[in-house]
Amino acid sequence: MDEDELIASVFAPLATAAGADALGDDVATFPCGEGDVVVTVDALAAGVHFFPDDPPGAIAAKALRVNLSDLAAKGAEPFGYLLALALGKGWTADWARAFAAGLEADNARYGVSLLGGDTLRAAGGTTISVTAFGRVPSDGIVRRRTALPGDVLVVTGTIGDSALGLAARLAEAPPFQVAPHHAAALDAAYLWPDPPVAAWRAVRDHARASMDVSDGLVGDLAKLCRAAGVGAWLDADAVPLSPAVLAVVAVLPEALDRALTGGDDYQILAAIPPERVEAYLADLSAAGVSGAVVGEIEEGSGVAVHRDGRPVRLADGRFQHF
Amino acid sequence: MDEDELIASVFAPLATAAGADALGDDVATFPCGEGDVVVTVDALAAGVHFFPDDPPGAIAAKALRVNLSDLAAKGAEPFGYLLALALGKGWTADWARAFAAGLEADNARYGVSLLGGDTLRAAGGTTISVTAFGRVPSDGIVRRRTALPGDVLVVTGTIGDSALGLAARLAEAPPFQVAPHHAAALDAAYLWPDPPVAAWRAVRDHARASMDVSDGLVGDLAKLCRAAGVGAWLDADAVPLSPAVLAVVAVLPEALDRALTGGDDYQILAAIPPERVEAYLADLSAAGVSGAVVGEIEEGSGVAVHRDGRPVRLADGRFQHF
């Protein structure tokens, strides 16, 4: 299968937006109208961000979803994306079809269209770069740097599933013993991140500042604080954990540290004015997204993590009481 | 140098647009207003589209320019780009700084801004994906599929320099003997493509159909014809050649075939209504871009190449008289 055939038979069916011109041209267009366009790009590399033998549909879904996660966390409604697919050695037509099927399912799931792209050969492993597009009202973007002391920290979904799923994959021997359905849930969380894309409107309507949690909850909160010139207080006991993560922590308490710092959650961490928290949680819920209050923005700098009502500090990758 | 430092110290200075937020957030924004946004993505892989030891600034310039070429050929004025930089083994801080310097020079040259991006490690070689943004009036995009019989084919710049520069690089022994300044010009054409970005307005104002010549003049004309459901006549003797290419052809006549089919020209091939040709050439000239009439769109299908007034056909990579 050559590049033209790959584009025409495998990817063109995903390009349903009019401005994509069925991938028959070098560019895509979309009308502007009111508001701002929001753009983001994230790339995944084989052997770094995914395992080369992961299901191709899962690789595709992850490449798209990590971008939709960024848009939703900024209050932007997604509408389309570009794909640059650098195919490493050993790719096959079947692999490409399964990859495209993963994107096609997500097009329906999230109401987005492939707008265009580039396919090429890479000398090494496969690298996938997705540029995603969304819209916000003029100057309606929700930034990191706008958090204010007193804002309440709310996180969506659950935290740590993917990090523990990855830990299990990377370990030569199982690092923890849990029931098979819990192990499967953690593995699925790593393979198929499930960002709360539908939360974009609640974020836009209520959040003072927001970001997606992709590099670990504690570290990303610290980034938000640095951007805003503030500090924060985080109640580790309030961080929402799935039954699978709770099962791991029950047999391996230090796994909680990994859960809070591990990354690949693709949930939304938002700083909400106190008077807006109730409405934010209600609008999240109406969008099918759970939310939990986990802390507060404070004057100062740095993230103070508390556990069992006492401050803890991160040392050697683990939280320890002072 | 870690990723945060790379972004803050090396790439943030290139992000001058307000909506880039100095790369301090996960997304970039830009206002819409009237018209359509035009987007394109092209990626380059080490060992495929560039040599790993090419000057980093040249690699960066090529990654950006191949995208600006697409925009200009569609009549779009460029304003910004996103960069996904997957760094292969062995990258250094000096390499990254020289790469960024290449982009910074092009920001000034073309009046564009870095808007955002992603930096990551790749397991194999470096892959660079650039998404570029431009604007056109509503429905003002110049497509491929709109060419009509009778339209005059005009190509900008000169053709074949880069393809012969690449041929010289790939050959173990020099494939042709020309004066050193000619050899250097061909090598520079491969390393530093020079698309006629300033031609965007002339294309928008006059072209019925257009595309950039990236995969070889003859093959790209055939693509334009297929998209439009037409044929074309191409006068090989009218194709503009640089002094360096003419010097090669003087000692190796078959090099002309490579020049016409080789690729990486990043010039603009446009189908111009006959009554507009004079104005198009004048506006190109006013923008500092040369243009040459090289053929005509016809009824039918396929590209008929003529040389010395007689039809020729491509066989075994060479044009031969029937």
Image: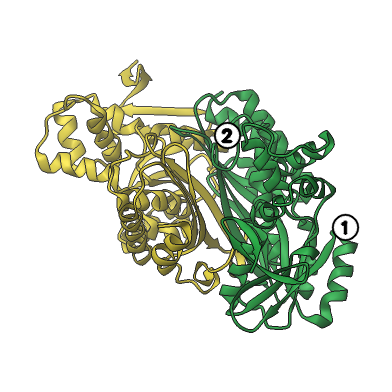
Chain colours: A green, B yellow
As drawn, the label of residue B243 is none
Q: Which mark is residue A288?
A: 1
SS class of the residue under badge 2? loop
- Give amino acid for label 2: Gly
> How packed is label 2: few (under 14 Cα within 10 Å), some, or many (20 or more)?
some
Closer to the camera, B246 or A6?
A: A6
SS under mark 1: loop
User: Relative to B198, does residue B267 appear above or below in the rendering?
Assistant: above
Question: Could you tell me which residue is drawn at 40 percent across and 49 percent down?
Answer: B63
Q: Quadrant of the C terminus of chain A?
A: bottom right
User: Can residue A31 be seen by looking at this rendering?
Assistant: no
Residue B47: horizontal and vertical position, in percent? 37, 34
Write down the residue under mark 2.
B229
Q: Nearer the viewer, residue B19 or A182?
A: A182
Residues beneath discs 1 and 2 located on the same chain: no
Q: Residue flagged by tag 1: what amino acid is it?
A: Gly
Q: Is residue B60 above or below residue B218?
A: below
Q: Above or below — where is B264 with respect to B303? A: below
Crowd around label 1: few <14 · some 14–19 · many ≥20 (10 Å): few
Chain for mark 1? A
Position of residue A320 measured from the top left corner of the image (x, y, whole percent):
65, 62
Tag 1 near tag 2, CB within 8 Å? no
Label 1, label 2: how far apart the Cα atoms are:
48 Å
**Residue B129 horizontal/vertical position (percent):** 48, 48
| Image-quadrant location for residue A240 | bottom right
Q: Is residue B176 left or right of residue B88?
A: left
On the image, which quarter does residue A230 sit in?
bottom right
The chain to which mark 2 is attached is B
Q: Looking at the image, which residue is at 76% across and 56% down? A: A197
Which of discs 1 and 2 lies nearer the camera? The answer is: 1
